[in-house]
Amino acid sequence: MTPAGRLMLLKPSAMIGLFLVAGWLLVAAFAPWLAPFDPLASLTPLASPGARAPGGGTFWLGTDLLGRDILSRVIYGARPVVGLSVLATSTAYLVGVSAGLAAGYFKGATDAILSFLASVVLSFPVLVLYIVVIVALGASYANVVLAVTFGSAPAIFRIVRAIALDIAGRDYVAASQAQGERAHRILIQDILPNAAPPLLVDYCLRIGYSAITIGALGFLGLGLPPPTPDWGGMVAEGRAMALAFPHLVIFPCLAISSLVVGLSLLADGLNAEGRRG
Amino acid sequence: MRETLTDLARRAGGLALTMLVVSFLVFLTLELNVEGVAVKVLGQFSTPDQRHAWLSENGYLDPFAIRYLRWLADFVRGHWGTSTYYHEDILKLILPRLGASAILAGGALLVMIPMSLILGVAAGAKEGSALDRSISLVSIVTTSIPEFATAVFLSAVFVIGLGWLPGVSTMAAGLSLRELILPVSVLALASTGYIARMTRASMAEVMAQPYIRMARLKGASPARIILGHALRNALITPVTVIMLQIPWILSGVMVVEVFFAYRGFGTLLYQASLNADVYLVEACAMVSVLAVVVSQTIADLIYVRLDPRLAPGGGRHS
């Protein structure tokens, strides 16, 4: 069955997940066309949701302390959160999958060393790991990606290693070895495709985790440098005045929650689909 | 008995080795660049001469390996240095904060464990039922919402909307249960769903076993089947999973403490990182990794205890 055909069979909750994820991807891609205002322009400070803008138009979600339109900031904020979590999860996959394949296929010392390193990194609470990296290297896009890669790769490594160990013992791998195939071809052609379905589910879930931690870093003020609209950072800025102006913090929280809930529902649906088919 | 002792020794060795490597990585990451350390300790506006004098005075011009060993020896003996931001001895600074965070995390576990086990057992006892599907859906949603967002939503309802609870938990007038409710709820909400799902999967698996079908055929009541036959085997996985959740809870504790201005270990590490307080970050990192490693070792031991097949030396309890 085609991938599109499989998606049609997803249960309703997974369809909602797919809808949310696709929606945020489109918002991130088309932010400049969707946002009604410039996300950095100071217009009317602390306008309530639905207030009229001075130059025409409406602040549907209100404005923040500096008079910036919250809807536009939420729309633009999708870019760093979606972009960085996808990018960081993908680099984590690159590291985790190659190390996992190598450990599961070569076994022995390679496996022992890589497994030990993975367990060492996994013994850090993930935020503590990020903080150590960011205190040492400073807050920037690249360092956020580096920290997330470092934090996620060991878990991916463990999944891939277990699958590779299982598959490396099978007859068709032995057949390829007997034909004199090179190790990296066996890993890529024979072993990796078998690992794909569980990894797809994990990939969806993990993008969600990365979004949560990138949001948390933004909330702690350790993520992206300020004028960039990012959802966690918006909550941090609005927190002091949230009692009087809850709209400052509610909407960015709804944005990040709906993105991660969407990813989790989608992952859950793909998982159920994989077990059934 | 001897197997248990060698097993314990092996685990303790593994724990020590992990801590050793972690300490090396932490030290390498934060103190390889000595100029950077001098800037962080003396501030942005120190002159190069001042930095150089400070570096040579504090032994920073020695080779890296010697500095690491000296630091490690100090650390093991409890000499964790002085915080550059708080100007206090780090060990004295950390201990009360750890206690405060333990209250928070303990409260969260106290709410989370019974809730997640009850929900998970209820869902898994009848796989595919409406109750099962709604519990699963709610679990997915609650675990997907970041802690700071849960904190915002709960505050919007209970602080701004209803006015029932305080919005900050500074504990200014001593320990207050009312101030603990929101932070504990946020932490519990973030993890309950995950453990409930694990319990559900484990319960559903046990309920499909032949011995449960046998009990049902003998006419045992559903309550007797669940409590008398299924529960013990179904709880092996969740009990371990709860211990393995501890690193996640620790990350959550930090966000929640900062959100509610709770003076615990998390806010301490947060302040340390904002102020580039290198020694404090090092000590906090070591303490939190130690907490994780110890809890995971305990999880292993519980797992072996509950599932005698895994005990060293095979089948019997030792």
Image: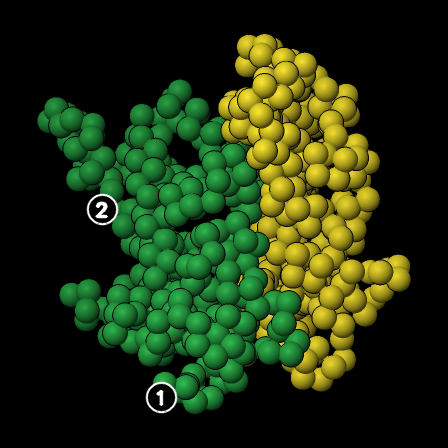
Helix, strand or loop at mark 2: helix
Q: Residue furthest right?
A: B173
Which chain is indicated by disc 2?
A
Which is more toward the observer, A103 or B18? B18
Q: Looking at the rendering, which quadrant does residue B40 occupy? A: top right
Amino acid type at image mark 2:
Pro
Using the rendered image of the protein, determine whether residue B251 is visible from the camera's viewpoint: yes
Callouts 2 and 1 in the same chain: yes
Query: Closer to the camera: disc 2 or disc 1?
Result: 1
What colour denotes chain A?
A: green
Name the residue tied to disc 1.
A56
Name the residue tied to disc 2.
A193
At which x and y percent is residue B192? 61, 63
Q: Is B285 rendered above or below residue B202? A: above
Residue at point 52% right, 34% down?
A136
Amino acid type at image mark 1:
Gly
Residue at point 33% right, 79% down?
A36
In the displayed structure, does residue A6 sit left or right of residue A158?
Answer: left
Disc 2 packing (10 Å; few <14; some 14–19; many ≥20): few
Residue at point 50% right, 65% down?
A234
Which chain is indicated by disc 1?
A
Which is more toward the observer, A158 or B187? B187
* Mark toward the start of the polypeptide (2 vs 1): 1
What colour denotes chain B?
A: yellow
Disc 1 packing (10 Å; few <14; some 14–19; many ≥20): few
C-alpha span from label 2 to label 1: 55 Å
Using the rendered image of the protein, determine whether residue B233 is visible from the camera's viewpoint: no
Which is more toward the observer, A63 or B18? A63
Quarter of the rendering occupied by the C terminus of chain A: bottom left
Q: Looking at the rendering, which quadrant does residue B92 occupy? A: top right
